[in-house]
C-alpha cells in the first residue's frame, strides 16, 4: 500500500499586483498505484493548480511532491514521466492527428517504426484510427478529446493527469465519454488523477474522491463512503443533488431535537454526544419521507417536478427542508405535511466547526 | 411638402459634392503613379523630352526596362543593387522576427523583474526614426568599422523589432498556455517550445513582423547612403534609384525612363506587400479586441 | 533572484542590448562628439572644444530660422493632412455613398506605394518648367507656376502638397475607422430630436473623435518633425536655408560638409525636442497601459 503520488503539506499563494490569494493551505493527498482519483471542488479553488504542481509546471511554496516513492520537487516536468490532458485539449492545429499523437514520442527520438506501432495501437484503443490524417479543426469535440487522451497514453506514462476533460462536451456525449473513460481505466490500470467540479462525474468515475475546499482536502475516500459519511458539513452539503439538508439542532434528553421536534438518536452517535450539545443535523432528501408518522412538521413552500422524481421544499420554522418523492402525490403550496426520517441515516456535525462528530471522535483517539 | 423637397435637394447636393471630391482626389492619387508607370514605357531620355502625349501613348517602349537590367554604372548595376537590397532586407526581416517574437514571448509569459519600467523605457525609444539616429549611428559605427551591411542590419532591426515585440506580446497573450505546458510535460525545454510551437501558433504576427522588417530595410535611404555610398558595388536599390533620378549628379544623370522603370520594379511589389500587411494588421487587432474564433 | 527569473532574463537580454547599443549609445556618443571638433580635417585626431559647437549654433548658426522652418513644416503639413484626411473620412462615412470600397482602394494608393520612391517621382514632377506639374497639371487648373528654386513660398507649397499626397490616406483610414465606431443610434436619436447636420457634427461627431484626433495629432507631430525625405529630396533645404529643418540640416552637415561635430550638436538638439515631445505623447495618450 505504498503511495504512488503523494502531496505533502502543499502551500501555494498567488500574487497579483497587490493582492495575495492563498490557494493551497497545507494540502495533503496520497494516491495509490492504479487508482482513479477525482479531485472534486468548486471552480477556482485550486484544482488545476494541484495538477500543475504534480506535473512540475508550477512550484509549490512549501511542502513536497513525491512520485513513485521519490521526491521530485526539483525535477522539471519533462523528467517526471507524467502525461496530461488539458481542459482545452491543446491539439496543435498545424499538425495532423497522427503527428499530434506521435509528438511526445518524436521528442524522445523514438525510431519511426516504433512510433507508428504505438500510435496505431493507441488510436485503435480509442477508436480514432480512421482519423489519423485529419487536422484538429476537422474533428468534433468528442473526437478531439479522444485524440488528446491518445496523446497522453502514447508515451506509456503510468501517471495521467486530466483537467476537466469532459466539460467541453455536449451532455449526451459526456455520458458516453464517461463510460469509455471508466472502461479505459479498467483495461489499462494506469494511475489517473482527474479534476472536475461536476459531482456526477466524480462519483461515477472515481475509485477515490478527494474534495477540495478552502485550500485543503476536506474528505478523501471511495465515493459512497464520502457520500454517506461526510467528514464535515461542507462536504455533506456539496455532495448530492439536491444537497443534504443541514439544520441547527440540540441534544436534549439523549435525542436529537430540531426546533420543537424530537427526532431520536442515530445509533452511531449514541455514545458520542452529550446532553445540551449544539449540533448541525444533516439529513439527505432521499432519506426523508412525507408521511403522517413523521416527527417534523412543516408547510410545503415549493415543488419541483423533475420527471424522475419530485423535490418538495418544506418550510419548518426559519429553515427549508428538501424532500425527494418518487411517486406523484399532488402536493400543493401551503399544504401542511409531516416528514419522517430514518433516524440512523442522520449525520451529526459539531455546531462550531462543522466537523462530523464521528470523525472528531476518531481524531481524539 | 416643401420641407421634404428641400431635404431631398440638400441630400442630392451633398452626394454630388461628395462624389466630386472623391473623384478629384482619386485622380490626384492615381496620377503620379500612372505617370511613372507610363514614363517607364516611354522612350524619353529626360524630363524635357517627356511630353504630355507620352501619358497616353500610341505604343509602349520596353527599352527602359532593358536598359535597367543590362546597363551598368560606376561599376555597379541595378540588378546588383536590387540583390543587395534583397539580401539586406531579407536578413533584417529574419532577425527582426526572431527578436520580436522572443521579446514578445518573454513579455507575455515570463516573470521578469521590472517588466513595466522596461516597457516604458523601450517604448520611448521607438520615437527615434532611422533618420534621427543617422548621424549618431554613423559616428559610432565609423569608430567600430561597422560602416557596412552588418552595420546596416544592426541599425535596422531595433526599429521594427520593438514595435513588433509589443504586437507579438498581445498576440501571444491570447494563446492558451496549455499548448506549451503539454509540450513541456512531454519533454521540450521552454526555448524549444517557443521555437517549435509558439512561433507556429503566432504565424500571423511572424508574417507581419517579417513584412515590416523587410519593408523598413528595403526602403531606407538615409542610413544606407551614409554607410555604403563610397562604392557603387555596395549600393542598395534605394541609392541606385536616387542616382537614376539624376539627383546624385545633374550632369551625368541617366535616362529618365530608366528611372521610371526602376521605380516601378521597386515600388509595385512593395505596394502589394503593404496591402497584405494592412489586412493582417486589422485581423490581428480585431483578434485582440476580443473577437474569439 | 530565483534561478527561474535569471534564466528568463536572457529572453529579454537581446532587445535590451540592442536598444542600448543602437539607440542610447549613439545618442550619448554623439553628445560626446558634439563637444569635440571632429570633422573631415580632424577625423582621427580630434580634440575637446567644450560648448564651442553649441555657441556656433546659437550665435552664428541658424537655430531660430531652423526652428521656425521646422515648425512651419510640421504644423503646415499636419493641419492640411489631417484636414484632408478628415474630410475624406467624413465623405466615405456617408451611408448612401456607392462604390465606397473602390474609392477607398484608389485613395489608399499614395500610402501603399513606397514613400521614398513616390518622393523621387514627385521631385521630377515639380521641376520647373519641365516637370508634369508645371507642364500640364497647374496650367490645367489655371494655377500659377511653382518654382521651388527661386521662391521660398513656392518651396513650401511644393513640400506641403507632396506631404499631403503622401499622408492623407493614413489619416483618412484612421478617422474613417473612428467614425465607423460611433454607434448609429446616437445620430438616430439626435435626428428624432430635430438636430440638423451641423448640430450632429458638432454635438456628436467631434466629441466622439476628440481622443482619436488628439492622439493622431500628437503622434504625427513627432513623426513629421523628424520627417527627413520630402525636404531632403524635393528642396534640399533650399532656396538657401529657407526650408531647412533640424533633421535635414544635421544630415547635410554630416554627410555633405563632413562637419561631424557640428552635425552631432544639431542632432542632440533635435533629439532633445523629440524626447520631450515623446514624453508628452506618452503622458497624454496613456498608451503604456495597453502594454502592462
Image (cartoon, coloured by chain):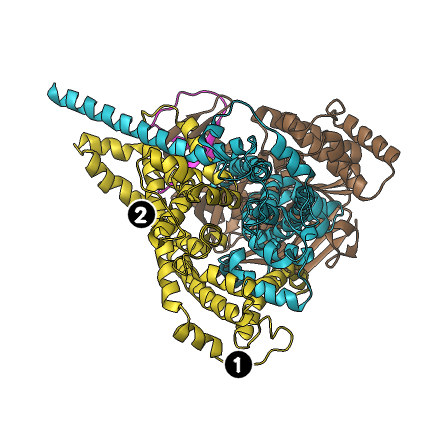
Chain colours: A brown, B cyan, C yellow
Please give the residue where the numbered disc 1 appears in the rendered image.
C49
Measured from the top left, where is residue B188 in percent x and y?
74, 48
Q: Which residue lies furthest to the top in this view?
A: B1
- Residue A328 position, x and y percent, is 45, 20
Q: Which of C1 and B47 is in front in this view?
A: B47
Give residue C254's quadrant in the image: bottom right
| Other-residue count near label 1 (Cα within 10 Å), few / some / many at <14 / 14–19 / ≥20 | some
Q: Is residue A170 left or right of residue B190?
A: left
Q: Are marks 2 and 1 on the same chain?
A: yes
Which label belongs to residue C210? 2
The residue positioned 39% from the left and 27% from the top of the image is C100
The span from disc 2 to disc 1 (Cα, nearest Å) is 49 Å
Q: Which residues are the magenta region?
A: A313-341
Residue C265 forms part of the magenta stretch: no
Query: Image height check: is A74 above or below B189?
Result: below
Given residues A270 and A210, the one toward you in this image is A210
Mark 2 is surrounded, within 10 Å at the Cα level, by few (under 14), some (14 to 19) or many (20 or more) other residues, namely few
Chain bearing tag 2 is C
Q: Decide if residue C253 is on the left or right side of residue A65.
A: left
Q: Position of residue B134 (x, y in %)?
A: 55, 60
Q: Residue at x 54, y 38 (%)?
A: B274
Q: Report the mark closest to the observer, 2 or 1.
A: 1
Instruction: Classify mark 1: helix, strand or loop.
Output: loop
Q: Can you tell which mark lies on residue B193?
A: none
Q: Is residue A330 magenta?
A: yes
Determine the residue positioned at 80% across, 32% down: A119
Where is residue A203? Give x, y as percent.
62, 36
Q: Residue at x 34, y 47 (%)?
A: C213
Amino acid at each position: 500500500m505504498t503511495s504512488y503520488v503523494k502531496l505533502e503539506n502543499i502551500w501555494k499563494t498567488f500574487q497579483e499586483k497587490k493582492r495575495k490569494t492563498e490557494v493551497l493551505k497545507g494540502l495533503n493527498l496520497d494516491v495509490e498505484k492504479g487508482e482513479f482519483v477525482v479531485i472534486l471542488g468548486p471552480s477556482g479553488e485550486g484544482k488545476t493548480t494541484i495538477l500543475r504542481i504534480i506535473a512540475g509546471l508550477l512550484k509549490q511554496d512549501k511542502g513536497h511532491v513525491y512520485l513513485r516513492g521519490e521526491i521530485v520537487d526539483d525535477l522539471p516536468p519533462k523528467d517526471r514521466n507524467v502525461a496530461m490532458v488539458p481542459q482545452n485539449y491543446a491539439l496543435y492545429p498545424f499538425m495532423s492527428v497522427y503527428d499530434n499523437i506521435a509528438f511526445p514520442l518524436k521528442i524522445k527520438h523514438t525510431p519511426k517504426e516504433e512510433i507508428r506501432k504505438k500510435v496505431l495501437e493507441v488510436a485503435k484503443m480509442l477508436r480514432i484510427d480512421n482519423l489519423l490524417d485529419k487536422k484538429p479543426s476537422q474533428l468534433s469535440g468528442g473526437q478531439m478529446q479522444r485524440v488528446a487522451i491518445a496523446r497522453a497514453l502514447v508515451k506509456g506514462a503510468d501517471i495521467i493527469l486530466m483537467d476537466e476533460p469532459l466539460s467541453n462536451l455536449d451532455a449526451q456525449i459526456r455520458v458516453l465519454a464517461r463510460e469509455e473513460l471508466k472502461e479505459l481505466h479498467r483495461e489499462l490500470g494506469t494511475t489517473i488523477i482527474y479534476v472536475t467540479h461536476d459531482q456526477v462525474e466524480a462519483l461515477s468515475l472515481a475509485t477515490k474522491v478527494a474534495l477540495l475546499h478552502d485550500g485543503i482536502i476536506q474528505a478523501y475516500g471511495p465515493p459512497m463512503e464520502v457520500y454517506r459519511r461526510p467528514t464535515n458539513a461542507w462536504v455533506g452539503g456539496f455532495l448530492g443533488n439536491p444537497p443534504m439538508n443541514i439544520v441547527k439542532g440540540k441534544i436534549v434528553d439523549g435525542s436529537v431535537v430540531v426546533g420543537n421536534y424530537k427526532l431520536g438518536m442515530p445509533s452511531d452517535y449514541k455514545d458520542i454526544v452529550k446532553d445540551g450539545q449544539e449540533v448541525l443535523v444533516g439529513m439527505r432528501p432521499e432519506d426523508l419521507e412525507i408521511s403522517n408518522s413523521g416527527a417534523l412538521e412543516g408547510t410545503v413552500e415549493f415543488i419541483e417536478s423533475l420527471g424522475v422524481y419530485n423535490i418538495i421544499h418544506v418550510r419548518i420554522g426559519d429553515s427549508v427542508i428538501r424532500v425527494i418523492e418518487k411517486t406523484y402525490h399532488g402536493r400543493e403550496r401551503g399544504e401542511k405535511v409531516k416528514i419522517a426520517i430514518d433516524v440512523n441515516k442522520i449525520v451529526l456535525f459539531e455546531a462550531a466547526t462543522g466537523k462530523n462528530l464521528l470523525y472528531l471522535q476518531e481524531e481524539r483517539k | 411638402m416643401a420641407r421634404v423637397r428641400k431635404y431631398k435637394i440638400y441630400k442630392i447636393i451633398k452626394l454630388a459634392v461628395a462624389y466630386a471630391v472623391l473623384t478629384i482626389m482619386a485622380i490626384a492619387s492615381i496620377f503620379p503613379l500612372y505617370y511613372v508607370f507610363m514614363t517607364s514605357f516611354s522612350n524619353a531620355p529626360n524630363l524635357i523630352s517627356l511630353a504630355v502625349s507620352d501619358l497616353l501613348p500610341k505604343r509602349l517602349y520596353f527599352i527602359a526596362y532593358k536598359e535597367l537590367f543590362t546597363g551598368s554604372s560606376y561599376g555597379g548595376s541595378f540588378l546588383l543593387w536590387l540583390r543587395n537590397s534583397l539580401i539586406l532586407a531579407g536578413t533584417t526581416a529574419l532577425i527582426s522576427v526572431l527578436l520580436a517574437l522572443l521579446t514578445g514571448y518573454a513579455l507575455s509569459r515570463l516573470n521578469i523583474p521590472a517588466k513595466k519600467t522596461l516597457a516604458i523605457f523601450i517604448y520611448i525609444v521607438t520615437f527615434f526614426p532611422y533618420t534621427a539616429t543617422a548621424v549618431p549611428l554613423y559616428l559610432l559605427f565609423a569608430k567600430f568599422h561597422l560602416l557596412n551591411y552588418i552595420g546596416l542590419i544592426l541599425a535596422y532591426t531595433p526599429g521594427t523589432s520593438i514595435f513588433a515585440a509589443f504586437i507579438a506580446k498581445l498576440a501571444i497573450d491570447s494563446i492558451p498556455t496549455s499548448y506549451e505546458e503539454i509540450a513541456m510535460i512531454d519533454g521540450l525545454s521552454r526555448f524549444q517550445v517557443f521555437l517549435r510551437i509558439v512561433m507556429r501558433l503566432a504565424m500571423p504576427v511572424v508574417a507581419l513582423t517579417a513584412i515590416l522588417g523587410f519593408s523598413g530595410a528595403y526602403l531606407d535611404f538615409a542610413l544606407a547612403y551614409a554607410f555604403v555610398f563610397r562604392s557603387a558595388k555596395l549600393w542598395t536599390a534605394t541609392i541606385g534609384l536616387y542616382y537614376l533620378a539624376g539627383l546624385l549628379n545633374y550632369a551625368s544623370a541617366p535616362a529618365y525612363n530608366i528611372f521610371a522603370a526602376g521605380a516601378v520594379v521597386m515600388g509595385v511589389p512593395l505596394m502589394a506587400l503593404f496591402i497584405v500587411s494592412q489586412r493582417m494588421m486589422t485581423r490581428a487587432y480585431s483578434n485582440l479586441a476580443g473577437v474569439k474564433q | 533572484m530565483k534561478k527561474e527569473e535569471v534564466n528568463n532574463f536572457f529572453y529579454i537580454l537581446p532587445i535590451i542590448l540592442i536598444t542600448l547599443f543602437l539607440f542610447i549609445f549613439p545618442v550619448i556618443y554623439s553628445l560626446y562628439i558634439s563637444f569635440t571638433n571632429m570633422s573631415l580635417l580632424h577625423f582621427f585626431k580630434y580634440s575637446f572644444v567644450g560648448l564651442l559647437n553649441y555657441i556656433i549654433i546659437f550665435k552664428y548658426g541658424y537655430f531660430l530660422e531652423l526652428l521656425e522652418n521646422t515648425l512651419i513644416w510640421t504644423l503646415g503639413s499636419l493641419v492640411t493632412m489631417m484636414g484632408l484626411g478628415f474630410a475624406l473620412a467624413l465623405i466615405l462615412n456617408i451611408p448612401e455613398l456607392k462604390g465606397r470600397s473602390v474609392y477607398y482602394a484608389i485613395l489608399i494608393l499614395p500610402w501603399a506605394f513606397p514613400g521614398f520612391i513616390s518622393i523621387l517621382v514627385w521631385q521630377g514632377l515639380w521641376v520647373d518648367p519641365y516637370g508634369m506639374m508645371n507642364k500640364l497639371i497647374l496650367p490645367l487648373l489655371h494655377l500659377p507656376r511653382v518654382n521651388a528654386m527661386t521662391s521660398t513660398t513656392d518651396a513650401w507649397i511644393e513640400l506641403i502638397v507632396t506631404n499631403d499626397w503622401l499622408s492623407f490616406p493614413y489619416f483618412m483610414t484612421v478617422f474613417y475607422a473612428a467614425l465607423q465606431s460611433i454607434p448609429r443610434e446616437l445620430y438616430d436619436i439626435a435626428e428624432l430630436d430635430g438636430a440638423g447636420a451641423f448640430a450632429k457634427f458638432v454635438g456628436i461627431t467631434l466629441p466622439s473623435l476628440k481622443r482619436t484626433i488628439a492622439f493622431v495629432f500628437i503622434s504625427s507631430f513627432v513623426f513629421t518633425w523628424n520627417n527627413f525625405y520630402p525636404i531632403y529630396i524635393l528642396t534640399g533645404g533650399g532656396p538657401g536655408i529657407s526650408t531647412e529643418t533640424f533633421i535635414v540640416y544635421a544630415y547635410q552637415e554630416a554627410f555633405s560638409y563632413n562637419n561631424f561635430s557640428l552635425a552631432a550638436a544639431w542632432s542632440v538638439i533635435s533629439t532633445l525636442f523629440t524626447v520631450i515631445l515623446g514624453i508628452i505623447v506618452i503622458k497624454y495618450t496613456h498608451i503604456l497601459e495597453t502594454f502592462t
